[in-house]
Amino acid sequence: MAKTHVSTCINGQDAEFLCSPEQTLLEVLRDTLHLTGTKEGCATGDCGACSVLLDGTLVCACLMLAAEAEGHDVTTIEGIASGNDLHPLQQKFLDHAALQCGVCTPGFIVASKALLDEDPDPDEESIRYWLAGNLCRCTGYDKIVRAVQDAAAELRS
């Protein structure tokens, strides 16, 4: 089967890749572009581990065909930090021990970034509602919510 040429922007950098028509964005990110921070948890869009931003909108990379990234701006967990400086969300997840095995963490951070980009001062109910599409089997959610609240406060100041 013929491969499709895709030109896109990933984490602020112009990117080009070839993909099969059936390849997901998640597969290309991990296997072709070696951006392994985005995780596969379920491959059905139910867990949020593969969350990325597409033109600022939260999407599951396991449900999106890689060819659909043509001309779009994709942000993965690797694009959240600024060089070696962690984004406040990343730092607060560490500070609040809002992670354990780490499979869900990139998706939670990307989803939280999408939330804070839309609402810089969310209440606890809004955070829990926004993150409901992300599943964690290790930590529970209280530490994650506290980390997002703390990061939001830091970003506002």
Image (cartoon, grey):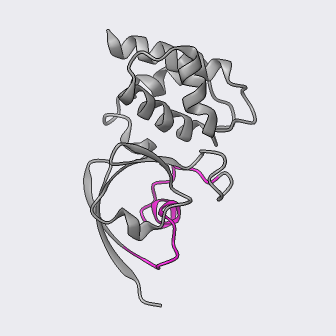
What residue do we see at 29% from left, 61% from top? 8
Residue 69 in which image quadrant: bottom left
Q: Is residue 89 above or below residue 17?
A: above
Residue lying farthest right? 137
Q: Residue furthest bottom?
A: 1
Number of marks in picture: 0
- Residue nearer the viewer, 39 or 141: 141
Q: Does the magenta-highlighted stretch encompass residue 34?
A: yes
Which residue is drawn at the image coordinates 51% and 60% (left, top)? 26
Residue 78 coordinates in the image, percent (x, y): 41, 44
Q: Is residue 93 above or below residue 66?
A: above
In screen coordinates, is 117 left or right of 136?
left
The range drawn in magenta is 18-40
The image quadrant where one finds the C terminus is: top left
Q: Please tell me which residue lies in front, 133 or 95.
A: 133
Is residue 67 at least partly visible in the picture? yes
Q: Is 92 drawn above or below residue 73 in the view shown?
A: above
Q: Is residue 16 magenta?
A: no
64 lies left or right of 81 = right
User: Measured along the vertical axis of the image, is residue 146 above or below residue 2?
Assistant: above
Kindly identify the residue that appears in the image at 75 percent across and 32 percent down. 138
Which residue occupies 41% across, 26% down? 116
Please state which of residues 63 and 75 is positioned toward the viewer in this rendering.
63
Give x and y (percent) for residue 32: 45, 67
Q: Position of residue 37 (x, y in %)?
A: 51, 47
In this rendering, does residue 94 appear at all?
A: no
Residue 85 drawn at (x, y percent): 35, 29
Occupied quadrant, residue 95 = top right
